[in-house]
Amino acid sequence: MQLSNQLLQKLNTLRPKEEEQLTNVVQNWLDIKRVSPEGIDQTNNRKVGANGEHKSRYEGQVNKKGQWHGYGKYTDDVGLGRREEGYWKNGLKHGQAIEICHDGQTYEGEWYKGLREGQGTLIEANGVRYIGQWRHGKFHGQGTLFYTDEEKFIGEFKEGQPWKGYGTYIFENNFKYNGFFDYGRQHGHCIEISPNGETFIEEWKEGVRLENKKIDDTQIKEAYKRRIMIG
């Protein structure tokens, strides 16, 4: 998979700021052995084969300790294959990078000490997508979770899950819910808009609708103005 032009531009502007001298290397592994590009086992100078064995490769910069540091690319052939490309610091992904996992999952965005942190985009093999903020490797902060192309949640996340606060849920049938959520469930007052444009003020509790009242355009404007959903 090719890196997006946008990510390549980011990578080119985020060169390491350390003054320490970096070295460009090519490192290959066969199972747990590290081998040279010519296939020589570097532990005992023995030629090793590649039939049916796990192969991996790092090509990029290292620091004086031999740790991956700076820009580099890592690949292996397990399952569907794995690829990591971007910036590293002291052996961990740090800064902008892309990770394509064995199961087809792809993450493109920011990293901090080996964890997904900052702004990033996750695409699962089944098509589910998340675009937004991350912390400690999980969805955390404002983001959008696409269950399908038509169904999505826009709002606040915490520890990998939709959280409390104001958000918008758009259903596959094009119903639109604007209101408050509690642990990912509708909770409190909201405005719901049907596919044909009819608008309702509703009250929910822990994902269960308690009240539903149709309103007109004037009432809609007044509801938003008064922030009735806060109540």
Image (cartoon, rainbow, N blue to C red):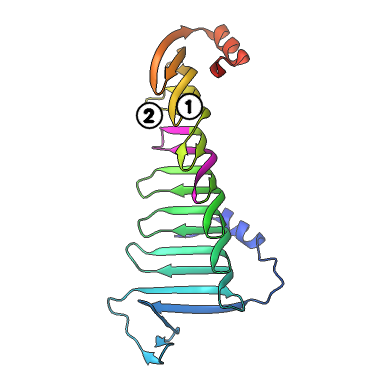
Q: Circle 2 — which element? A: loop
Q: Which residue is mark 2?
A: 172
User: Against 35, is 140 above or below?
Assistant: above
Q: Is residue 149 one of those drawn in magenta?
A: yes
Question: Which residue lies at the image location 52% right of the left edge and 56% below the top edge?
Answer: 115
Q: Main secondary structure of the magenta part?
A: strand
Q: Is residue 51 one of those drawn in magenta?
A: no
For the residue pair 223 and 64, the one nearer the viewer reads as: 64
Q: Is residue 94 left or right of residue 190?
A: right
Q: Circle 1 — which element? A: strand
User: Against 221, is 117 above or below?
Assistant: below
User: Against 211, is 52 above or below?
Assistant: below
**Which image quarter holds the N terminus?**
bottom left
Question: Which residue lies at the image location 69% right of the left edge and 74% below the top edge?
Answer: 20
Question: Which residue lies at the image location 38% right of the left edge and 29% below the top edge?
Answer: 172
For badge 1, the amino acid type reads Phe
- Percent across and percent down for residue 218 are 57, 7
For badge 2, the amino acid type reads Glu
Q: Which residue is mark 1?
A: 181
Picture quadrant of residue 184: top left
> Gap in Å between the C-alphas at discs 2 and 1?
19 Å
Range covered by the magenta-colored residues: 137-153
Question: Which residue lies at the image location 48% right of the left edge and 78% below the top edge?
Answer: 27
For the residue pair 146 and 149, the one nearer the viewer reads as: 146
Residue density around tag 1, few if under 14, some if 14–19, many if 20 or more, within 10 Å:
many
- Percent across and percent down for residue 180 are 50, 24
